[in-house]
Amino acid sequence: MLRTSVDVYHKFAPETSDKNRPDAYLVDVAEQRRDNSTIHVNTTISYKGNPVSEPSESFLDFKNSFSYGSRNDLNFKFLKGLSAEAAADFFQQLLWKLGDAYDSDDWSPVIEHVRAGQAANYAGPTRWAYDDGPRTPLAKPLSAAKIALITSTGHFVEGNDPKPFGVDNMTQEEAVRRIDEFLKATPVLAEIPVDTPHERLRARHPGYDVRGALSDHNVALPTDHLRALAAEGVIGSLHPVAYSFVGACAQTPLIKRTAPRWVEMWKTAGIDGAVLVPV
Amino acid sequence: MAEEAGIATVIIATEIFRDRVEAMRVPRLLTTPFWMGRPLGRAGDSTTQRRTLLAALELLAST
């Protein structure tokens, strides 16, 4: 078990050079790890019980800042879910693997290390329980079926902004800041003609790093590949509109009210099968 | 609920979400070894993206 010891005072003066301040102390708050090494999570200098300099940022604050904090990076928001010990191990291994990759030019261990970190944050049982749903076979051979694409990536077409909370052209940064509001909001479905050129596609989502999707929408909204497969006859046809919404939304309204309306619309459109892409 | 309406569905998700998506008892799930936000493959990796999509469509058609 991780043990935490706080208020571990190491005498700083007068043995040190600061002989004029005999009551100054280095206040060191540390976590002791299983191997008895120590992670310093907060260090301040105090004089007669008062801080005499700006407190240094703790390691806990540092690792947590990647999750909707001062260093927000949604690829690494999982760091907040790790203990200080696990986060320190993550960084140590990351740097070690970077050193290996520099010499080997094989970056896959670095990429896998990050992926494993992301996965650890979502692994294990969920607090939600679901019933088994039916599995409906595709009514036609794939080469005759009408296929639709539906994603939770937050894509939309330039000039047709779903305007979350009434805000037009909301930036990704503002979306991230308003994550709590998104999580309480009813999702809005954006309609995206499948032949929309990449230059006119936008993506905004408070829950994941959209840079990949902005660079190449096919990482999560594979309209180009589906159009090609339709042209090649692999699928019968592609529904001319792809749909996208921000998956970071209120789940109960989505399941009970919004999604049933969407399904009815897709059924009316004669869609046989759907590719669903959550992110 | 799409299945109940006669629409067959397949989900493409990164392996990262496997436990969560499987808990939803979805009818068909293809998981991939990519980072969050890039479930079909990395940006610019058209070959992998297409292969991922074909695998999902095969799952859709065969089960």
Image: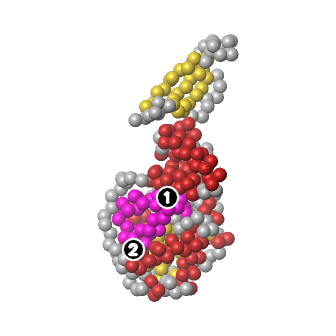
Question: In the image, residue A4 lies at what x, y percent?
Answer: 45, 30
**What crowding class fits label 2: few (fewer than 14 Cα within 10 Å), some (14-19), or many (20 or more)?**
many
Magenta range:
B10-38
- Tell me the number on the disc at residue A195: none
Question: What residue sits 47% from the left and 86% below the top?
Answer: A143
Image quarter for residue B48? bottom right
Q: Is residue A3 left or right of residue A204?
A: left
Q: Mark 1 is on which residue type?
A: Ala
Colouring scheme applied when the structure was drawn: secondary structure
Question: In the image, residue A19 lies at what x, y percent?
Answer: 67, 12
**What crowding class fits label 1: few (fewer than 14 Cα within 10 Å), some (14-19), or many (20 or more)?**
many
The local secondary structure at tag 1 comes to loop
Question: In the image, residue A56 lies at what x, y percent?
Answer: 61, 31
Image quarter for residue A21? top right
Asked whether residue A253 appears in the rendered view, the answer is no
Q: Is residue B40 magenta?
A: no
Q: Mark 2 is on which residue type?
A: Ala
Question: What residue sits 65% from the left and 52% below the top?
Answer: A103
Question: What residue sits 55% from the left and 63% below the top?
Answer: B38
Pointer 1 chain: A
Q: Is residue A203 above or below residue A196?
A: above
Asked whether residue B20 appears in the rendered view, the answer is yes
Q: Is residue B19 magenta?
A: yes
Question: What residue sits 55% from the left and 45% below the top?
Answer: A93
User: Which residue is tagged 1?
Assistant: A248
Callout 2–callout 1 Cβ contact below 8 Å: no
- Tell me the number on the disc at residue B2: 2
Pointer 2 chain: B
